[in-house]
Amino acid sequence: MIIGDKFRKAVIRLILKTIPATITGKVKSVDETDFTCVVTPSRGGPDFESVRLNVAVSDDDSGIVCIPDVDSEVTISCLFNNEHAYQVTRFSKIKKWHLKAVSGRTFEFTDDGKIKINGDQYGGLPIQEFILDNLNAIKDYLGSLNTAIGNAFTAVGASTAANGANGKISFDAEMGSQIITFNEDENEDVKHG
């Protein structure tokens, strides 16, 4: 029994010496759904398939995941001395950061400066400065409208004709240059859902 244990331990040590602890290579493709990638080793040899982008110990995909860009240089490490389980541990080019809380809330930051909070189905976040500009434009328009209506009624009252033609002319003159225009009030770089 003792000889069997020694033999078994010696074989395990030999096997572990043949499995490199870390390997450098290039990202060939990325699966952002499964958080895995295919890595072509720099030293040659077959591609490493389904290399994990995060260490998932359960089906729960919460945590922070760094998603590398295709063709970026990476270092992958063997997980638990298992030659079939590798994880990316270093990245040269990061395409996206993905964070998912246990509650299911998500946050993504991409290399082009875009941010998504819980998805992007509601579009961009409003930009406060533009909202205030739009509200001030409405306020100015309504103030002008109030003045124009007052002047129009004065003109109608002063008119000898009761048909209101002078009131219309006065109203058109006051309101002709008053146009409501809205600035783009959405920040396309920050989306939420």
Image (cartoon, rainbow, N blue to C red):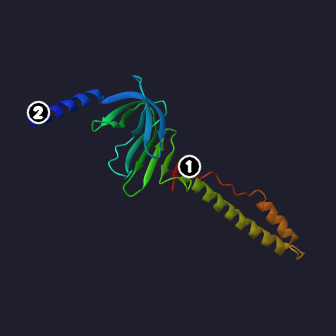
Residue 49 position within the rendered picture, expressed as x and y whole percent measured from the top left: 42, 36
Is residue 170 placed above or below 187 in the rendered structure?
below
At 90% from the left and 75% from the top, the residue drawn is: 161
Give the camera-side residue of 21 and 160: 21
At 27% from the left and 36% from the top, the residue drawn is: 81
Farthest residue in the right direction? 161
Number of the label disc, if any, that sits on residue 3:
2
Dot placed on the residue nearer the N-terminal end, 2 or 1: 2
Whether residue 185 sits left or right of residue 3 in the image: it is: right
Give the camera-side residue of 6 and 135: 6
Callout in the foreground (2, 1)? 2
Secondary element under disc 1, as helix, strand or loop, is: strand
Residue 84 position within the rendered picture, expressed as x and y whole percent measured from the top left: 35, 37
- Amino acid of disc 1: Asn
At 70% from the left and 57% from the top, the residue drawn is: 180
**Would you identify the image quadrant in which residue 89 lies?**
top left
> Looking at the image, do the residues carrying marks 2 and 1 touch, with CB atoms under 8 Å apart?
no
Is residue 129 placed above or below 156 in the rendered structure?
above
Q: Which residue is mark 1?
A: 187
Q: Residues within 10 Å of mark 1 (few under 14, many from 20)?
A: some
Report how many numbered discs are placed on residues in the image.
2
Farthest residue in the left direction? 2
Whether residue 56 sits left or right of residue 159 in the image: it is: left
Whether residue 149 sits left or right of residue 130 in the image: it is: right
Residue 129 position within the rendered picture, expressed as x and y whole percent measured from the top left: 55, 52
Where is the N terminus found, in terms of image quarters? Answer: top left
The CA span between labels 2 and 1 is 70 Å
Q: Residues within 10 Å of mark 2 (few under 14, many from 20)?
A: few
Farthest residue in the top direction? 43
Secondary element under disc 2, as helix, strand or loop, is: helix
